[in-house]
């Protein structure tokens, strides 16, 4: 069929992805995907940062000082948002998949958002109260 | 009331590529989108092609993407839309035959995969097969499906993987797996318990948002996920 030939499969996917209306569930899914990708990238950074351990204690401590600069504290806080949302929404997904959560997924999602905000705010306090 | 319909047009015999065209019409606000399409076809452009049959939300022929969301054109009124500029597309992910008509072959092939018929190992009774009220309640929602395809075509998992069974086929699997009169639950669970079956459902809930019969498909899929998980224990 000529429609298939005129536009590539990926372009059609992208088009419908952007044009299709997003609902509460779709946003939760999109956020879960992006936070998941973010956390995967973080693991790489984390492992690279830890290779400093191979150079001995002094070199490692020197490297760790870099991570207490304000920029990295903010980055850490941002990482906290990813971890919190991904973890709490993960519990929501378990409730939906293996509990009765599919009937109440919107209400649970409101709890997920509120809990994420509270925990991220608390984390911000713990990080920045000691600066 | 002045309404503008922005319709995605494509005639494989004439057009190289799909294009969009605006149709301005004057209709009462109680008109359904299907009535608007009829008006366009009957009064303005007789070449416009779309499916319609019963036009009362039972046959499921006129599922289309209206303002970026799949719905039945016969179930929404013009006054339901705040903006009177309404975009109409064929339901996504299925190949377009002409204008708003899509080829639903793959949809029905997936439907057949889950064996959508009663499989009973017992001798047929003289009269009807009896079922208790509690047993029937389990499938109360699932039997309402009209196979319009709005759910499967709204699923991002299906957009990116055309082998995915899709919510409609899996709802039908549920309908027989949880039917007390059916004896082939395990057989059907084997069919849906695959990476292109149950486990590709990422609980996005697009299908639940669009179902014209208000079936909570994700709940039905989750019940089968639970059953499959329990089977492994």
Image: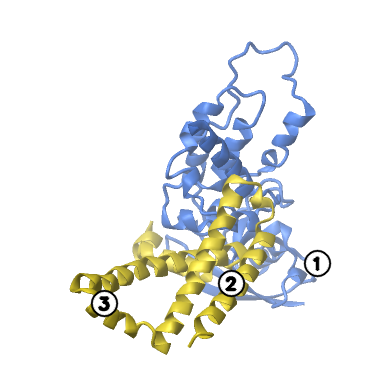
Question: Image quarter for residue B121?
Answer: top right
Between B203 and A35, the one nearer to me in the picture: A35
**Residue A103 rendering spot, x and y as whole percentages:** 69, 51
CA gap, disc 3 to disc 1?
A: 72 Å
Between A28 and A61, the one nearer to me in the picture: A61
CA gap, disc 1 to disc 2?
A: 49 Å
Q: Residue at x 50, y 32 (%)?
A: B233
**Residue B96 rendering spot, x and y as whole percentages:** 47, 57
Between B192 and B66, the one nearer to me in the picture: B192
Coloring applied to the structure: by chain
Per the image, the residue denoted by label 3 is A60
Residue B30 marker = 1
Per the image, the residue denoted by label 2 is A119
Residue A14, above or below A104: below
Q: Residue at x 51, y 41 (%)?
A: B108
CA gap, disc 2 to disc 3?
A: 30 Å
Chain under numbered label 3: A
Question: Image quarter for residue A60?
Answer: bottom left
The crowding category of the residue bearing disc 1, from other C-alpha atoms within 10 Å (few below 14, some 14 to 19, many at least 20), is few
Q: Secondary structure at mark 3?
A: helix
Query: In the image, is B87 to the left or to the right of B84?
Result: left
Between B142 and B79, the one nearer to me in the picture: B142
* Residue B27 at least partly seen: yes
Residue B203, above or below A122: above
Residue A96, above or below A118: above
**Camera-side mark, 3 or 1:** 3
Chain identifier, colour blue? B
Q: Secondary structure at mark 2?
A: helix
Q: Residue at x 60, y 19 (%)?
A: B120
């Amino acid at each position: 069929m000529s429609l298939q030939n005129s536009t590539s499969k990926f372009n059609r996917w992208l088009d419908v992805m952007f044009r299709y209306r997003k609902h509460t569930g779709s946003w939760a899914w999109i956020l879960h995907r992006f936070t998941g990708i973010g956390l995967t990238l973080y693991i790489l950074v984390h492992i690279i940062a830890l290779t400093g351990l191979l150079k001995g204690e002094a070199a490692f401590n020197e490297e760790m000082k870099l991570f207490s600069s304000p920029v990295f504290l903010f980055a850490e806080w941002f990482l906290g948002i990813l971890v919190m949302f991904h973890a709490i929404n993960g519990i929501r997904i378990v409730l939906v998949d293996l509990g009765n959560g599919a009937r109440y997924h919107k209400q649970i999602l409101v709890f997920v958002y509120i809990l994420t905000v509270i925990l991220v705010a608390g984390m911000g306090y713990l990080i920045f109260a000691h600066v | 009331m002045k309404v503008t319909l922005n319709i995605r047009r494509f005639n494989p015999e004439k057009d190289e590529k799909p294009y969009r065209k605006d149709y301005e019409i004057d209709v009462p606000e109680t008109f359904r989108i299907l009535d608007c399409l009829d008006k366009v076809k009957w009064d303005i452009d007789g070449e416009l092609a779309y499916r319609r049959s019963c036009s009362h939300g039972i046959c499921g022929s006129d599922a289309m993407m209206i303002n970026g969301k799949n719905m039945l054109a016969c179930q929404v009124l013009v006054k339901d839309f705040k903006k009177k500029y309404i975009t109409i597309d064929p339901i996504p992910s299925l190949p377009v035959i002409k204008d708003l008509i899509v080829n639903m072959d793959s949809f029905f092939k997936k439907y057949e995969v889950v064996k959508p018929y009663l499989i009973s190992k017992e001798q047929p009774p003289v009269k009807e097969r009896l079922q208790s009220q509690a047993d029937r309640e389990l499938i109360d929602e699932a039997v309402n499906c009209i196979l319009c395809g709005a759910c499967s075509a709204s699923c991002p998992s299906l957009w990116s993987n055309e082998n995915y069974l899709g919510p409609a086929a899996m709802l039908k699997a549920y309908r027989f797996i949880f039917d007390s009169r059916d004896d082939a639950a395990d057989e059907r669970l084997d069919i849906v318990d695959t990476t292109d079956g149950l486990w590709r459902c990422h609980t996005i809930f697009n299908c639940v948002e669009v179902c014209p019969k208000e079936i909570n498909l994700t709940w039905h899929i989750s019940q089968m996920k639970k059953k499959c998980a329990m089977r492994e224990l």
